[in-house]
Amino acid sequence: AQSVSQHNHHVILSEAASLELGCNYSYGGTVNLFWYVQYPGQHLQLLLKYFSGDPLVKGIKGFEAEFIKSKFSFNLRKPSVQWSDTAEYFCAVAPISGGYNKLIFGAGTRLAVHP
Amino acid sequence: GAGVSQSPSNKVTEKGKDVELRCDPISGHTALYWYRQSLGQGLEFLIYFQGNSAPDKSGLPSDRFSAERTGGSVSTLTIQRTQQEDSAVYLCASSSGSGVGNEQFFGPGTRLTVL
């Protein structure tokens, strides 16, 4: 069965620290890849996505993610986090064979950034 | 409307009762999705509607779960004879089309607690 694994359930950082959140998926076919973020008290929103082309994609608020096909990974990075990045982050994949974005989510990573 | 809305925001019910959860998608969005987020887990796909096409119900966990979408807009997720394991946050999302390139916009969710 298709699945998405996020390696860290909780991450605590100080402001200005670098961030990398791991995401691996299990699916042999072609997928679209997403990172969603949920800030406290807010809706889930799209942070960035990868469909094709340059495997390094940039999203909002200085986030980026790199798709490494050979490793089935799509790790999220930010060089310097801010207190406002405190949120829960979800990695998701959508097999394109399904014809639509039937998203398969990871369990999420809660990030707490301390001033 | 400006975004996806869901009602109620919170629902507490007793085991064995039926519940209805409502989703109002963004105006003009033809695709609508329901997901469930159980404690400590990622979002789990439940059902997908696209226009007048037959819905993809492959994610519904049991025959106690059903959903409909009237007039291609509002959707209702019904859970019959609720069980404690149904306690979760139920999220609705909509997108402007069904293709894999269409971003899903999420609502605030309905937190269901089954006592």
Image (cartoon, rainbow, N blue to C red):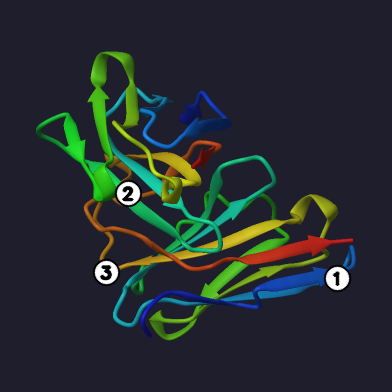
Residue B40 in the figure: left or right of residue B18: left
- Please report, as a chain letter, where disc 1 is located: B
Query: Going 9% across and 34% down the picture, which residue do you hit?
Result: A53
> Could you say which is closer to the camera, residue A84 or residue A34?
A84
**Residue projecting furthest to the top:** A70
Q: Position of residue B92 (x, y in %)?
A: 50, 65
Q: CA distance from mark 1 to mark 2?
A: 38 Å
Between tags 2 and 3, which lies in front? Answer: 2
Q: Few, some or many C-alpha atoms within 10 Å of disc 1 (few <14, some 14-19, many ≥20)?
A: few
Between tags 1 and 3, which lies in front? Answer: 3
Let me know if marks 1 and 3 both belong to one chain. yes
- The residue indicated by pointer 2 is A47
Query: Going 25% across and 43% down the picture, which residue do you hit?
Result: A62
Query: Going 58% across and 31% down the picture, which residue do you hit?
Result: A9
Q: Earlier in the sequence, mark 1 or mark 3?
A: 1
Q: Which mark is residue B17?
A: 1
The correct choice, above or below, for B22 with respect to B43 in the image is below
- The residue indicated by pointer 3 is B96
Residue A51 in the figure: left or right of residue B26: left
Q: Secondary structure at mark 2?
A: strand
- Amino acid type at image mark 3: Ser
Q: CA distance from mark 2 to mark 3?
A: 18 Å
Residue B69 in the figure: left or right of residue B82: left
The answer to whether residue B54 shows anywhere in this view is: no
The correct choice, above or below, for B10 with respect to B61 in the image is below
- Please report, as a chain letter, where disc 2 is located: A
Q: Position of residue A108 (x, y in %)?
A: 53, 39
- Please report, as a chain letter, where disc 3 is located: B
Q: Secondary structure at mark 1?
A: loop
